[in-house]
Amino acid sequence: MGELGLLVAGAGGMLLGVFYFGALWLVVRRLPRVASPALLLGVTGLVRLAVVVTGFYLLVDERWARLASALVGFLAVRVALTRRLGGRVALPRGAGRDRTTAAGE
């Protein structure tokens, strides 16, 4: 079960990455439309973290090679989603303007 365990851990890491970063993307897109964005980001962040930590715990089974494989899968999803969605970020109104500071710089 050595190589198969590594493949399962890698695939599981990829699924955890899709869940984590996909949910993060959805939450960030929704932030401008909610009354309390900090609460939404904090609660969903804790839920995402709990799911991913639990998933890694179940995948790893106290074997460092499985942990490495799962982390590689998780980070591969992050890189792929960043490349795929990286150019689609819309800035809020006025975010790109130069602003002066209170000190008058």
Image: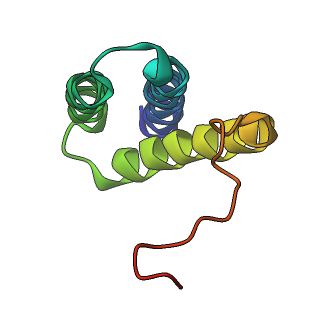
Which residue is nearer to you in this view: 56 or 18? 18
| Res 42 seen here | yes
Residue 103 drawn at (x, y percent):
41, 82
Q: Position of residue 63 (x, y in %)?
A: 26, 48
Residue 19 visible in the current orientation: no
Who is closer to the viewer here, 75 or 83? 83
Q: At x 54% / y 31%, what residue is drawn? A: 14
* 81 to the left or right of 9: right
Residue located 43% across and 28% down the image: 20
Left or right: residue 49 compared with residue 76: left
Instruction: Give 7 or 82, whichever is nearer the viewer.
Output: 82
Quarter of the rendering containing residue 97: bottom right
Q: Does 91 sit left or right of 6 as displayed?
A: right
Residue 23 location (% of width, % of height): 46, 21
Provide residue 30's location: percent of width, then percent of height: 49, 17
* Quadrant where the N terminus is found in the figure: top left
Vertical placement of residue 99 versus 15, above or below: below
Identity of the residue drawn at 44% across and 47% down: 71
Q: How is the image coloured?
A: rainbow
